[in-house]
Image (spheres, helix red, strand yellow):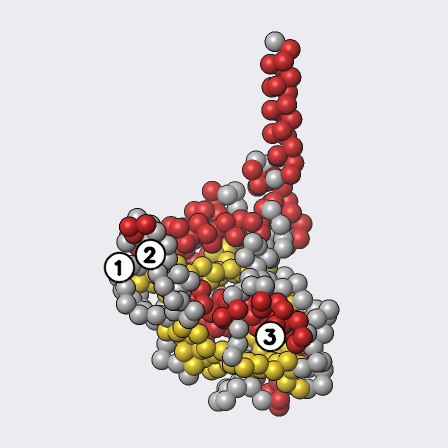
Amino acid sequence: MTSLGNYSNKIVLALVLLLLLFPSLGLGNEIGKEHFASIKGGTRIAVYPVENLSGAMGPVREVRKMLIERLRAAGVDVLDEEALQKFMARHRIRYTGGIEKNTAQAFKQEENVGGVLITSLELYSDANPPKISFISRLVSTEETPSILWIDGVGMAGDDSPGFLSLGLIEDPSILLDRAMKKMFDSLNQYLYVSAQSGGKEAHRAKRKFLPKIFYRSPALDQEQKYTVAIVPFMNLSVRRYAGEIMVLHLAKALKEFDNFNVIEIGTIREIFLDLRIIMDQGISLAQADPIFAMLNADLILSGNVTYYDDYQGELGKPIVGFSTQMIAKKGQEVVWSSDGYNEGDDGVFFFDLGRVNTAHVMATQMARWIGKMVLTHEKKIQASSNQD
């Protein structure tokens, strides 16, 4: 009896230690809500209607419904649908791809909302094998809205077919559910476990996704924290909304690094509308001055998208090509520029090992290299690339 009692005590002690070390296994939701409230000013979240950047019909209502259901199941207070619709009508909100200062403050004051979840559907194809890509971000309702968390997922039914194609996914609803689980795991990690944006995959990028050409100024300091404004990209591709999609990828990539504070996309859009800025061939130094002043930014990132191609069905390959240019407020000079191009079968020699099936996955790694290289001295870039 004594040995059995000691054994039971050890089990109880082990469980207590697990709960202390990993609060998300048990009491993590309550701890997380207090943590979120203390930092962000409120735990209620408003879930915006999904922005459709796919260029075709997509399950935008289903994606939003699944996000709301998972948030509520995790104990998050989500602003109810009737209140959201009345709020949007009252403030005449039509654009759901971002949020600006006045709307953010109204959410906080009128509805006690601490964050707005904004989701953009990038790709949806129900052709066999199905494909889906989307990016979500949580934006604060502080006086100056900030991106608290941002992540994305891109999946294809034939990503991991396995032996005899037993892992092939042919049902779009199953693929959507798996993509949603991956996305929500990341959001749940932010809300309830840690306020750090980087996860297991943060900073990882394969060498084949390095920019083909780049320039980095010695004026960039890898120890400094920069506030970055990612302005609208010129879309020179045949893919509709490719410019908006690339901005999201770069925001997601830079947010992974502690050195970058990425300004909310909706705030930048409002400034461009106020200043009536229309870019024909990228942003000029003359246009940069008022943007630096109004956004209090250190760096402005702009660029062009030349290719952003996905494909439907079994045959084809995604293609992504884009260029970037970064202007620094200090010195009014170009401190970074790059040009990159990749295809889904780059570096694939047999059995489709290493093949990429969505432009999302490729753009994620290509954008991640921008963040890594801007913060890395040129001599260390080659060493860094050899490790990835």
Looking at the image, which is closer to me, 103 or 387? 387
Disc 2 marks which residue?
A: 157
Residue 74 position, x and y percent, is 50, 43
Disc 3 and disc 1: Cα gap in Å? 39 Å
The residue under label 1 is: 128
**Residue kind at label 2, given as amino acid type:** Gly
Labels 3 and 1: the sequence-earlier one: 1
Residue at the spot x=61%, y=39% of the render? 23
Judge from the rendering whether residue 15 lies leftward or rightward of residue 157; answer left or right. Answer: right
| Residue drawn at point x = 69 percent, y = 77 percent | 220
Is residue 331 at least partly visible in the picture?
Answer: yes
Answer whether labels 2 and 1 touch (C-beta < 8 Å).
yes
In which quadrant will I find the N terminus?
A: top right
Whether the residues at callouts 2 and 3 have beta carbons within 8 Å, the answer is: no
Q: Distance of mark 2 from mark 3, alpha carbons? A: 35 Å
Task: Please tell me which residue lies in front, 70 or 323.
Answer: 323
Mark 2: secondary structure: loop
What residue type is disc 1 on? Asn
The quarter of the picture where residue 229 lies is bottom right
Q: Categorize mark 2 by other alpha carbons within 10 Å: few (<14), some (14-19), many (20+).
A: many
According to the image, label 3 marks what residue? Answer: 229
Q: CA distance from mark 2 to mark 1?
A: 8 Å
